[in-house]
Image (tube, rainbow, N blue to C red):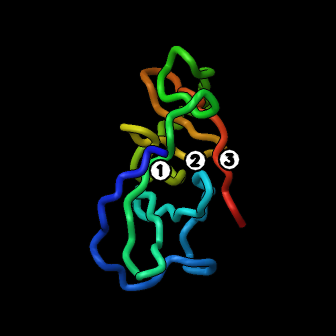
């Protein structure tokens, strides 16, 4: 698992069901998308920074991914309306349960992500 075991600065709340942040399945646990970070809430109250794994199911590059063109001129980035999430060594955006990575004049489809209700 491509986890960054770096602890995050203390939060003003505890991540959990109903905390207001998008929950995603990450391997055998649940993480929370929070301001472009992927947080894992530990039982002791600390929060670890995680990153989704680059795998054959969730490739990290252009050569192994489908290309997506957003016809409306949409460009992923800060304020685009999609949540940013760390994936490997880069940032992707969650769009309808898929990871989109902006790349030149298209987006790379980096595969599915399980968003939990």
**Any mark on residue 85, and which?**
1
Q: Earlier in the sequence, mark 3 or mark 1?
A: 1
- Asked whether disc 1 touches disc 2, contact meaning CB atoms under 8 Å apart, the reply is yes
Give me the residue at 46% from left, 42% from top. Answer: 87
Q: Which residue lies furthest to the right in this view?
A: 117
Residue 90 pos. (x, y %): 38, 38
Give me the residue at 44% from left, 64% from top. Answer: 39
**Any mark on residue 1, and which?**
none
Q: Nearer the viewer, residue 19 or 73?
A: 19
Give me the residue at 50% from left, 34% from top. Answer: 54
Q: How far apart are marks 1 and 2 (CA)?
A: 7 Å
Residue 2 pos. (x, y %): 44, 44
Q: How crowded is mark 1: few (under 14 residues within 10 Å), some or many (20 or more)?
A: many
Q: Residues within 10 Å of mark 2 (few under 14, many from 20)?
A: many
Secondary structure type for disc 2: strand
Q: Which residue lies furthest to the top in this view?
A: 63
Q: Give the residue at mark 2.
A: 94
Secondary structure type for disc 3: loop
Q: Earlier in the sequence, mark 1 or mark 2?
A: 1
Q: Give the residue at mark 3.
A: 97
């Amino acid at each position: 698992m491509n986890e960054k075991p770096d602890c995050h600065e203390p939060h003003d709340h505890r991540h959990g069901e109903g905390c207001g942040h998008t929950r995603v399945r990450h391997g055998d646990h649940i993480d929370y998308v929070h301001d472009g970070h992927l947080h894992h809430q530990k039982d002791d109250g600390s929060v670890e920074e995680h990153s989704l794994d680059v795998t054959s199911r969730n490739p990290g590059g252009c050569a192994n991914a489908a290309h997506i063109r957003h016809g409306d001129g949409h460009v992923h980035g800060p304020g685009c309306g999609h949540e940013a999430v760390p994936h490997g060594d880069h940032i992707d955006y969650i769009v309808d349960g898929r990871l989109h990575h902006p790349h030149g004049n298209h987006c790379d489809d980096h595969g599915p992500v399980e968003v939990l209700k």
